[in-house]
């Protein structure tokens, strides 16, 4: 059986995960984000971290309505969208997705460092998709600390501003990359990467492709 998992970044915090002919989409956004083309995706399943328009735009995804069996085991860990227990922006779900002995963690709009209890619920991860742009979420320094908290092998930055794309108040990814430390930074030529049996420690920068 093919045990590869393909990850595609569609911009902002939206990703597709595909394995064994099954796909799921995380945090689809609406048409209001500056620069981004409208999303038109197809998948078997959609997961949303919270109900804001740039993370839960379900009309962007057409469901396959097939009877395919998902290789993904999904858990959600409750966190906050801010650093004051949701008083500003409410709750946020961190999705923990496991397939073929690999654990992928999508942080959504995480707004704080993880507590000991949340770390225990999430566990070590192979791939971490983490916001780095600050303002609405954790910033670059906090994102780097979360990567260390979770002992992440591959870290994919998301939810940042670049060029004319994204929310203007967000910082660019450069602030996060400057804190890479012992993580090699690998810039991919396309918006996808494939996880095989062996993955190397890295910060994976995926470009946005229309």
Image: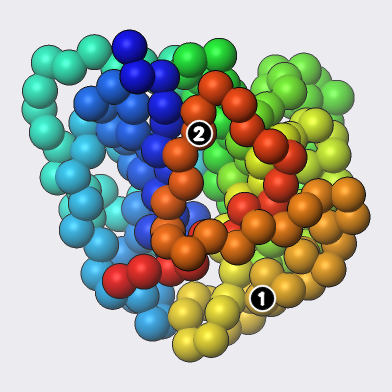
- The quarter holding residue 19 reads top left
Quarter of the figure with the C terminus: bottom left
Q: Residue furthest right?
A: 181
Where residue 48 appears, x then y in whole percent? 41, 41
Q: Answer above or below: position of 81 versus 116.
A: below
Where residue 25 appears, x then y in whole percent? 34, 41
- The quarter holding residue 173 reads bottom right
Residues packed near mark 1 inside 10 Å, few (<14), some (14 to 19) or many (20 plus): many
Mark 1 or mark 2: name the one nearer the start of the chain: 1
Q: Answer above or below: position of 84 versus 44.
A: below
Instruction: Residue at 65%, 57% (x, y): give it.
Output: 186
Using the image as rendered, state which of residue 47 and residue 183 is in the foreground. Answer: 183
Q: Answer above or below: position of 175 versus 90.
A: below
Label drawn at residue 87: none
SS at badge 2: strand
Question: Residue at label 2?
Answer: 195
Left or right for 40, reference 181? left
Where residue 196 appears, x then y in whole percent? 50, 28
Instruction: Residue at 17%, 17% (x, y): give it.
Output: 68
Question: Residue at label 1?
Answer: 172
Instruction: Residue at 33%, 33% (x, y): give it.
Output: 18
Instruction: Residue at 77%, 64% (x, y): give it.
Output: 176
Q: Is residue 13 visible?
A: yes
Q: Residue furthest bottom?
A: 164
Where residue 147 appears, x then y in whole percent? 78, 42
Using the image as rendered, state which of residue 111 and residue 193 is in the foreground. Answer: 193
Using the image as rendered, state which of residue 146 and residue 90 is in the foreground. Answer: 146
Tag count: 2
Q: Is residue 82 visible?
A: no
CB under 8 Å between callouts 1 and 2? Answer: no
Left or right for 115, reference 97? right
Given this view, does label 1 or label 2 mark the residue nearer the observer? 2
């Amino acid at each position: 059986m093919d045990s590869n998992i393909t990850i595609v970044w569609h911009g902002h915090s939206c990703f597709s995960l595909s394995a064994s002919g099954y796909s799921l989409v995380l945090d689809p956004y609406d048409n209001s984000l500056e620069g981004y083309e409208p999303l038109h995706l197809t998948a078997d399943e959609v997961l949303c971290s919270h109900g804001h328009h740039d993370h839960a735009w379900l009309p962007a995804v057409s469901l396959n309505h097939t009877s395919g069996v998902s290789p993904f085991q999904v858990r959600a860990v409750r966190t906050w969208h801010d650093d004051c227990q949701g008083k500003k922006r409410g709750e946020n779900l961190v999705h923990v997705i496991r397939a073929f002995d690999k654990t992928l963690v999508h942080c959504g709009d995480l707004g704080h460092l993880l507590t000991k209890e949340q770390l225990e619920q999430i566990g070590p991860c192979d791939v971490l998709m983490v916001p780095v742009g600050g303002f609405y979420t954790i910033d670059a320094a906090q994102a780097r600390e979360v990567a260390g908290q979770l002992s992440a092998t591959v870290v994919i930055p998301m939810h940042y501003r670049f060029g004319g794309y994204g929310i203007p108040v967000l910082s660019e990814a450069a602030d996060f990359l400057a804190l890479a430390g012992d993580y090699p930074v690998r810039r991919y030529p396309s918006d996808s990467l494939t996880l095989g049996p062996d993955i190397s420690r890295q910060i994976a920068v995926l470009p946005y492709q229309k």
